[in-house]
Image (cartoon, helix red, strand yellow):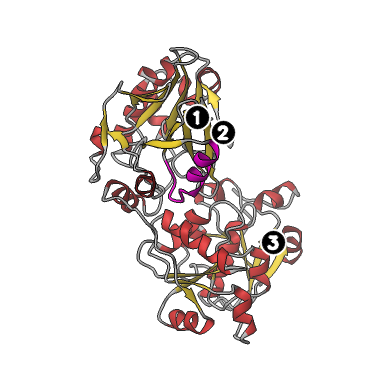
Amino acid sequence: MVFRQLIHDDLGCASYLVGDEEFGVAAVVDPKLDIDEYLRLADYLGLRIVAIFETHNHADHVSGHGRLAAATGAPIYINRIANPEYEHVALEDGDEVAVGALKIRALHTPGHRPEHTCFLLIDDSRSGDPWAVLTGDTLFVGDVARADLAVDAEEGARGMFRSLHSKLLTLPDNVEIWPAHLGGSLCGGPGMDMKVSSTIGFEKANQSLLAIEDEDEFVEVSTRNLPDQPPNFASIVEVNRGPLVESVSEAPRLSPGQLEELMAAGTMVVDVRAPADFDRSHIPGAVAITITGAGFGTRLAWLAGTDSPVAFVGDTTEDGERAALLAAAINTAPAVGVLEGGFDAWVAEGRPVDSIEPVTVHELYERWQPDGGRLQVLDVREPSAWREGHIPGSVNMPYRLIDSIPEGIDPDRPVAAICGLGQRSAVAASLLKRYGASEVLHVVDGGVGTWRRAGWPVES
């Protein structure tokens, strides 16, 4: 048997290639938009992709099922009540599909979405018992999926409770859990682990939500602190339900002059270089969203939506093109272009640049004054984190909501943007600069937690 987990680090998604080496066949479960990795892996292993499975209509990323079906001719299997507009094989609870000696059994597990289906894996060459379950967006390592992306949160949570207790938790303790998301995904809660797999027994013994046996209590706890719904989620679901996306258009390559014209017409320029490079020098008005760490797609979705035209600038042309493909995966407006030659091409023509001052947490403390003083602090974490502890006198505005100078911030006085680790504050600092703050500081190499650990004043 062949089993491979493929992780989309930026979105915290996991997909799977499973199959039978002796028969030379494989299936892909929950494919991402960039399908090249599946094709390369199948070719390397000498396998033909003969089936594509979807656990549900995804709400956080555009699926690659259309592109993969076009490339391989494989049929797409999905639960009947998903109601897709494309040709597919409709699955019912308990249906089995053979991929060589591997059996893939559908388990209908509504909750995250009504059509959600997990897939049991049974290797007939070894045993008739299931050895693993692909839990999709139902059961994660350390948490369960959120239940408010298709129906009312309470209704979804009740479905989730019943799916867990009547289906997944009745499996033998030694059955392995392989989820569709890892820690950091918007489809789960704060308990999600970065660990890639677990077992039914371990999660039953160690996950607090699974220990709740009363349905009403489970609903109350699991819906108590749901975060804001993922950006673009409704439009992404419709793309995944609709006619197949069989290709992705390449973003045009732009000269510096063409990029300048687009900026004058209202195009948002997103600089995907490392935050330190952006701070040192960047195109005036550009927004810093790096692709050097996880979360690029999520941050872009919050700021760009589905209508705003976007152009990308990287260290190289290829960096910009990679960003454009990630943008397509979260269904933002199609990229109007990427700067050919990267940021250096802009500098080479002597065009204007701007900069932001980076400061460490210690340097921020040295310049901060308990009575307020001239320096302002903008805390760009979520309100729940800010309430738990923040620098006295700081103003709270999550980075994703900044569309002007925040209330309480004087654009003519210095303002330092701070978060937890420094990446969200990089985005926020660039937005402050974009909207007219005269002197912006980006707090790097740590954040409010670093401040707290140093023993400096904190309010809650």
Inspect the magenta stretch and tell me whether residue 337 lies in it: no
How far, Cα to Cα, is label 3 from label 1? 49 Å
Label 1 belongs to which residue?
A: 178
What amino acid is found at the position of numbered circle 2 in the picture?
Answer: Val
Please rate how many residues cluster around mark 2, counting C-alpha atoms within 10 Å: few if below 14, some from 14 to 19, many from 20: some
Please provide percent x and percent y for residue 402. 48, 64
Q: 102 above or below 51?
A: above
Cβ atoms under marks 2 and 1 closer than 8 Å: yes
Q: Nearer the viewer, residue 404 or 195?
A: 195
What amino acid is found at the position of numbered circle 3 in the picture?
Answer: Pro
The residue sitting at 58% across, 37% down in the picture is 194
What amino acid is found at the position of numbered circle 1 in the picture?
Answer: Trp
- Magenta residues (range): 31-45
The residue sitting at 35% across, 48% down in the picture is 70
Label 3 belongs to which residue?
A: 370
The residue sitting at 48% across, 16% down in the picture is 125
Q: Secondary structure at mark 2?
A: loop
Q: Nearer the viewer, residue 450 or 239?
A: 239
How far, Cα to Cα, is label 2 from label 1? 7 Å
How far, Cα to Cα, is label 3 from label 2? 44 Å
Q: Is residue 409 visible?
A: no
Q: 440 above or below 104?
A: below
Inspect the magenta stretch and tell me whether residue 40 lies in it: yes
Label 2 belongs to which residue?
A: 196
Q: Give the left or right position of residue 339, taking residue 161 as reference.
A: right
Q: 149 above or below 160?
A: below
Q: 143 above or below 11?
A: above
